[in-house]
Image: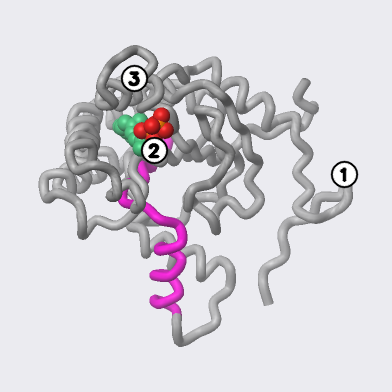
């Protein structure tokens, strides 16, 4: 049972894994798994605000995913573009603000344009910030932020702001409270390494295309049972100290 003071996770980050295995188990091409994965995205985006989640970051394409076969990369790029194009109006209506984090300079022009259009069309959304990570690498983002700040030793806040700027994230999102990864894998794969410093981790064997509202609810319940101590003693949680 969650404690009486259980706070929902404000920021949930999801590593969506298992699309390929979902398709292979059905004798389908891997692309079918990615298409089914988009439906899971829709379910989770609908469910997130009902749990008090204000920011949801989805790992859609890592910078290392460029190493996949070219037809799969092309298919993923066009799926992401179609999602942004098709979902934009519904997001705007339901108060979902879309943002894409990661590099933009290596994306197909049509996808880069769809990103800008979706971000502009949904800029007024204040119910959920939906961040989709595309061509994203946390280590590269940290390196770029360090380059931006090389003349002054930054505070954690200043470094966080530089990091947001280095990934086109706009304003700084709150730290990640909960990282979810599907398909039985238990690793971070270069996702939000700075922002997840004190995140709780929740893993499930469920493949991403099978993930839905009930799984998100289970992850949130598990989060609410955790005691977050930030290095302090039980019951004596202090805010994290700013770096010197
Ligand atoms: C990992 O499964 C999944 C990806 C690399 C792509 C994620 C993309 C989507 C869910 C679809 C589009 C997303 C949005 C936000 C609209 P995998 O291919 O590595 O699966 P496997 O480990 O079973 O091979």
Numbered mark located on residue 235 in the image: 1
User: Which residue is depicted at the point 62% across and 33% down?
Assistant: 202
In the drawing, what numbered circle is on residue 23? 3
What residue is rendered at 29% in x and 26% in y? 30
Say which quarter of the image contains residue 96: top left
Range covered by the magenta-colored residues: 127-149
Crowdedness near tag 1: few (<14), some (14–19) or many (≥20) residues, C-alpha within 10 Å: few
Distance between the alpha carbons at the discs numbered 2 and 1? 32 Å
Residue placed furthest toward the left: 110
SS category of the residue bearing label 1: loop
Say if the magenta span includes residue 8: no
Q: Which residue is mark 2?
A: 130
How far across and how far down the image is residue 131, in percent? 38, 42
| Viewer-side residue, 51 vs 31 | 31
Q: Earlier in the sequence, mark 2 or mark 1?
A: 2
Residue at 78%, 39% (x, y): give it: 227
Q: Which mark is residue 151?
A: none
- Decide: is 167 above or below 87: below
**Ligand 1 visible in quadrant:** top left
Which tag, 1 or 3, sits closer to the chain's start? 3
Q: CA distance from mark 2 to mark 3?
A: 26 Å
Q: How is the image coloured?
A: one colour
Whether disc 1's CB lies below 8 Å from ligand 1 is answered: no
Q: Position of residue 158 (x, y in %)?
A: 51, 70
Q: Is residue 204 left or right of residue 85?
A: right
220 relative position to 170: left or right: right
Callout 2 crowding tier (Cα within 10 Å): few <14, some 14–19, many ≥20:
many
């Amino acid at each position: 049972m969650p404690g009486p003071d259980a706070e929902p996770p404000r920021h949930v980050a999801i590593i969506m894994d298992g699309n390929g295995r979902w398709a292979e188990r059905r004798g389908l091409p891997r692309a079918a798994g990615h298409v089914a994965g988009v439906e899971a995205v829709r379910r989770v985006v609908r469910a997130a605000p009902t749990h008090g989640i204000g920011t949801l970051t989805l790992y859609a394409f890592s910078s290392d995913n460029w190493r996949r076969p070219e037809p799969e990369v092309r298919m993923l790029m066009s799926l992401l573009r179609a999602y942004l194009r098709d979902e934009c109006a519904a997001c705007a209506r339901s108060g979902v603000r879309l943002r894409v984090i990661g590099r933009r300079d290596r994306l197909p022009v049509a996808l880069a344009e769809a990103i800008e259009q979706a971000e502009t069309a949904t800029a007024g959304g204040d119910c959920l910030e939906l961040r989709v990570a595309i061509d994203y690498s946390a280590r590269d983002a940290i390196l770029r932020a360090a380059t931006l700040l090389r003349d002054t030793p930054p505070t954690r806040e200043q470094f966080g702001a530089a990091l947001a700027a280095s990934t086109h994230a706009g304003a700084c999102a709150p730290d990640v409270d909960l990282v979810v990864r599907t398909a039985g894998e238990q690793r971070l794969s270069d996702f939000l390494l700075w922002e997840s410093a004190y995140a709780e981790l929740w893993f499930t064997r469920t493949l991403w295309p099978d993930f839905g509202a009930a799984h998100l609810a289970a992850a949130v319940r598990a989060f609410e049972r955790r005691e977050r101590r930030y290095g302090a003693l039980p019951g004596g949680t202090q805010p994290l100290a700013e770096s010197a």
